[in-house]
Image: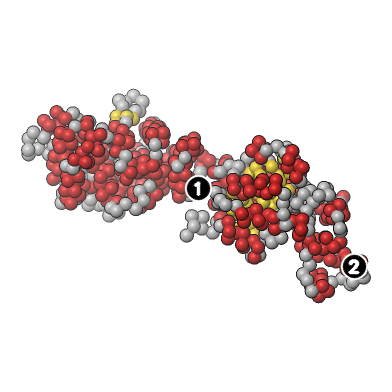
């Protein structure tokens, strides 16, 4: 099932918001229908009516049917205009009355810019649309733009194209493919519409190659040169969205299939563009309360990571998510004076996970695919969140301890991403980076956020969760369950996620033990009967098979060299051996 399900409008709005200025709009005669400007088909039927009436034919219920019975052909807009008027000037004069409003029509609001034109103009004003391509002769689009102070670069002929400001330098470029109704050079007939000039074709080829496209009000049936431009575009860098009322014709279906277009069923152009504008505007105005789905945040993080030039956008995206998270954490749903009990604990932990999920998954993605720039952003976010979580005057001690649970989720996801990609130096640097709170000594991240080192990691609290009542490592077990559910976002489908998770915790234990010197550990382990130095140990403490596996790993020369090069164990082989001894001693008291 698609991420957006049956709501492609949200997908389009999000894509426009994240790719400002990339989408062009292609407008056909249907866009002006709400302004009481007839479509080409309606003009065709009216021309049939007018010519027939001049010949004394009585009024018909269906002029199209009458014309077919008379000529054995279906009425054709281009053919009729060519028969009625032999020159472009004559054709322009005929069309004038269909497009220019009379005084009465103006008073009635007819043949004036519609809600759709105004919505498109606002998208231009906000910078989301810079190129408008239209087959229409009317001036509704440029009038709507001028009403909000935008003077578009209008290209309606080859002469205008040659003298126009380059597309890249314009706020709005309006390409009127078939001309302007006040210009005698308008294109109407099949022969006129079959081929564009080389200059037009070059501009269209570039537009189709470099822009996403929103098609509305165009049938895709007649304008052969425009159809050819869509068909010959070699690349599909950005998507095509085709807004349609009812079923598409054969010509339009050919185009949508060729371009892989997303077909969107709409009620009318007014409602379509108004809703699109409102959705994009909502995304812009509510950036600090980003309503987008978790998957969209993850997808966008991955996209921004793929190109170094998107570093600023990634920073902005993470800032939005951090602000959203803090707003929720400080809200009434997480009151520090709320009643304390089993159900309340379960509900609050679940809520913390819900609001942390987007940022945690993004952290996992960065842990796996980030660079030093993104790793620094993660560290600064962790430091900022830690300071914020600690600035609370008072409340229930249990809720105060759990307040930083979102940090544990971010810490764990980022670490798992790093382990998944084998970024062990990044992981060790992260474990050993310092956090500070006002009036307190700096402490390493691993000594604050790893398992039992965390103030909220009290075993009795996490045993309140369903199914963990008798577990020896309830926090570790629950974190595994959460991360296992989120893993596809940042860990893909590793052969054994259990092993990946346990490897992260073993490395966390190693980093934690490194708060001691090698001599201190040596002394503590000199008495064979002692439990060794205390250190946080996760599920591996009671998983005998996993413990044996990691014993083999840590004795491997390849693994040793890799971990020591990353800075683990103080870079000492002996410390690594002592750690393994300490781990086995601690585990001996945890196993069933």
Using the image, determine if residue 241 lies above or below residue 313: below
The local secondary structure at tag 1 comes to loop
The residue drawn where x is 86% and y is 52% is 89
The image position of residue 175, as x and y in percent, is: 71, 46
* Residue 585 figure quarter: top left
173 horizontally vs 339: left or right: right
* Residue 285 figure quarter: top right
61 horizontally vs 30: left or right: right
147 horizontally vs 411: left or right: right
Q: Which mark is residue 53?
A: 2
96 horizontally vs 336: left or right: right
The image position of residue 456, as x and y in percent, is: 30, 40
The image position of residue 99, as x and y in percent, is: 81, 53
Q: Residues within 10 Å of mark 1 (few under 14, many from 20)?
A: few
Q: CA distance from mark 1 to mark 2?
A: 58 Å
Which residue corresponds to mark 1?
292
Q: Which mark is residue 364?
A: none
Whether residue 106 appears in this view of the structure is no
């Amino acid at each position: 099932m698609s991420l957006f399900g049956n709501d492609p409008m949200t997908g389009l709005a999000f894509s426009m918001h994240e790719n400002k200025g990339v989408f062009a709009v292609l407008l056909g005669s249907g866009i002006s229908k709400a302004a009481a400007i007839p479509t080409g088909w309606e003009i065709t039927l009216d021309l049939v009516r007018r010519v027939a009436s001049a010949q004394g034919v009585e009024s018909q219920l269906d002029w199209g049917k009458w014309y077919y019975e008379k000529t054995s052909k279906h009425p054709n807009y281009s053919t009729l205009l060519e028969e009625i008027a032999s020159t472009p000037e004559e054709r322009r004069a005929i069309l004038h009355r269909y497009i220019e409003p009379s005084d009465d029509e103006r008073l009635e609001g007819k043949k004036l810019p519609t809600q759709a034109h105004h919505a498109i103009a606002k998208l231009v004003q906000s910078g989301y649309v810079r190129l408008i391509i239209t087959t229409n002769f009317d001036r509704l689009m440029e009038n709507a733009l001028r009403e909000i102070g935008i003077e578009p670069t209008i290209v309606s002929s080859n002469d205008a194209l040659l003298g126009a400001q380059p597309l890249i330098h314009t706020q709005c470029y309006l390409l009127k493919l078939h001309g302007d109704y006040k210009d005698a050079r308008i294109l109407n007939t099949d022969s006129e519409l079959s081929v564009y000039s080389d200059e037009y074709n070059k501009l269209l080829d570039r537009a189709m190659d470099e822009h996403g496209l929103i098609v509305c009000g165009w049938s895709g049936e007649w304008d052969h040169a425009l159809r050819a431009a869509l068909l010959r575009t070699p690349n599909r860098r950005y998507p095509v969205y085709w807004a349609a009322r009812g079923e598409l014709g054969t010509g339009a279906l050919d185009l949508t299939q060729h371009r892989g277009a997303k077909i969107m069923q709409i009620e009318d152009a007014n409602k379509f563009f108004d809703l699109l504008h409102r959705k994009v505007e909502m995304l812009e105005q509510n950036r600090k309360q980003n309503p987008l789905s978790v998957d969209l945040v993850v997808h966008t993080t991955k996209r921004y990571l793929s190109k170094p030039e998107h570093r600023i956008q990634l920073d902005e995206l993470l800032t939005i998510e951090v602000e959203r998270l803090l707003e929720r954490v400080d809200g009434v749903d997480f009151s520090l004076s709320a009643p304390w009990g089993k159900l309340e604990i379960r509900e609050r932990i679940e809520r913390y996970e819900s609001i942390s999920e987007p940022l945690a998954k993004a952290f996992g993605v960065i842990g796996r695919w980030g660079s030093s720039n993104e790793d620094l952003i993660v560290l600064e976010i962790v430091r900022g969140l830690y300071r914020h979580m600690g600035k609370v005057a008072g409340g229930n001690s249990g809720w105060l301890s759990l307040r930083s649970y979102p940090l544990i989720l971010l810490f764990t996801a980022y670490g798992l991403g790093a382990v998944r990609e084998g970024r062990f130096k990044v992981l060790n640097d992260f474990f050993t980076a310092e956090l500070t709170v006002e009036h307190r000594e700096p402490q390493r991240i691993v000594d604050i956020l790893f398992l039992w080192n965390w103030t909220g990691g009290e075993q009795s609290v996490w045993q309140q969760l369903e199914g963990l009542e008798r577990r020896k490592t309830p926090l570790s077990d629950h974190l595994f369950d959460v991360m296992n559910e989120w893993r596809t976002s940042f860990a893909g489908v590793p052969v054994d996620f259990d092993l990946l998770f346990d490897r992260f915790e073993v490395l966390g234990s190693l980093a934690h033990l490194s708060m001691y010197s090698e001599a201190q550990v040596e002394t503590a382990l000199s008495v064979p009967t002692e439990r060794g130095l205390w250190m946080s140990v996760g599920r591996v403490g009671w998983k005998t098979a996993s413990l044996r596996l990691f014993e083999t790993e840590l004795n491997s020369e390849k693994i040793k060299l890799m971990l020591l090069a990353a800075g683990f164990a103080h870079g000492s082989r002996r410390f690594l051996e002592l750690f393994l001894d300490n781990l086995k001693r601690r585990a001996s008291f945890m196993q069933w």
